Image (cartoon, rainbow, N blue to C red):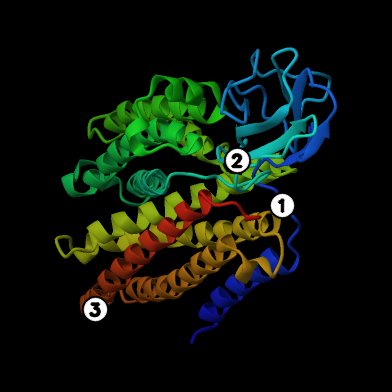
Amino acid sequence: MTRRLFALLALVAAWLGVAVLAAAPASAHVELLSSNPADGARLTSAPAQVSITLSENIGIQPNSIKVVDAHGTDVVSGPVFQPGEVAEEVAVKLEPDLPDGSYLVEYAFVSTDSHPVRGTIAFVIGTGPLITSAGAVSASTGTDPVTDALFTTFRWGSFGGVALLGGLVFMLVCRPGGRTDPAARKPITAGLWLSGVTAVAGFLLQGPYVAGRGAGAIFDPALIEATLRVAYGKLLLLRLAAIGALAVIVRRLLAGDLPDRLRSRYENLGIAAGFIVMLSFSATGHAVADKIMFLSVSADLAHFGAMAVWVGGLIQLAVLLRGRYSASEAEPALARFHPIATWSIVIMVVSGAYLGFRLVPSVEALWTSAYGIVFLLKLTGFAALLLVANMSRNAVRRGITGRGGTGVVTADLRKLRVSVGVEVLIVAAVLALAAALSSMSPTG
């Protein structure tokens, strides 16, 4: 192996070491800290209200607390409100003079990272039996399995859409002549459509995902209204608007007759719209629930942005290396992409190490939690990706060195077609694991 290969492996090892050996406890989902009445409490008189204190301020979420008697009759007499100066405390008023009996408090909140948390609390008025439901005072999402699978699948698709759009950087910086190439434009167009469709699907699925309902409830007006009330729904609408703006900007940028003055302006607008799209992901993920939110969200943005630039470039390389283009056209693009790919990898490793440090609770969590196992699988996939990428970089370096001999260049390009194709396949698997991680709790 070459020294650079050992260096890449050392980077991955350092990422793993920093991420798990020095990991600090994290709480990516909202948690119930206390309630009044407490779970299992026996009261001599009926309470005027039920209050719940959470681990984070999630605002007032309508219909997030429901109280029923032993017959399932709702005994709440008003909307959810904040009873005092503690922002993390929410409550509901109860009907006056409730009779003796057992009561069940059902709560369902959406964390700042857009994931649902539900559970139950039971209490008794008088001396009657305490009736509870399975999983009382739990932090389980209770999501419908089909809805959960669809939500994760469309999340994967949304990551893929951003990755395809990242190829615009390659086209503008590394291969300007590709603007008018239909084959090079297709992945960008596909990225716009995929990003738009998955954003709409994510918006419609969020309601059933949180409520524990099946996919048949995606058009339920009440669930759509609930999604609009939370930050996740608003950010998805913002993402859709940014994608629409990108569609107009990309069409102008890829026009062959655009003056340089206007091209620079549209490039700046494209950067702004792309930033909004990526921010809509980072501001609804695990990073936003971290105590040091600014640094975690910034690291997530850097990680996601570097991934998009690198993966988008790989996809454009796969198009360029299909055999339809001469070495004289491919060679300059490869040379320009080489430093961009290197810096993208460095940014991904550094930001990924920080995010792992903040989100993975402990070393034991790697093999005792589903999140830790998937995290290790993603890390393994990334390591394999770096190994294959190192082969590609060596081929690029030899191709540049052997520019005077077309036979050497052609041989290197032939190897590149294979290695870049393998990279794209591994990337698809890594993005699928990333989508799964985004739907899981690091502490679960």
The residue wearing badge 3 is: 411
Which residue position is annotated with label 1? 26
Camera-side residue of 228 and 311: 228
Residue ID for mark 2: 117
Q: Looking at the image, is mark 3 or mark 2 earlier in the sequence?
A: 2
Q: Which quarter of the rendering shows the C terminus?
A: bottom right
Name the quadrant containing residue 75: top right
Task: Kindly indicate the quadrant of the structure image that contains residue 84.
Answer: top right
Q: Nearer the viewer, residue 79 or 109?
A: 79
Amino acid under disc 2: Val
Report how far apart the C-alphas of labels 3 and 2 lie in the structure: 55 Å
Q: Residue furthest front?
A: 128
User: Which residue is situated farthest in the left direction here?
Assistant: 324
Residue 261 at least partly seen: no
The residues tagged by marks 1 and 3 sit, at their Cα atoms, a distance apart of 49 Å
How far apart are labels 1 and 2 at the CA level? 16 Å
Query: Residue at the spot x=48%, y=31% of the render?
Result: 272
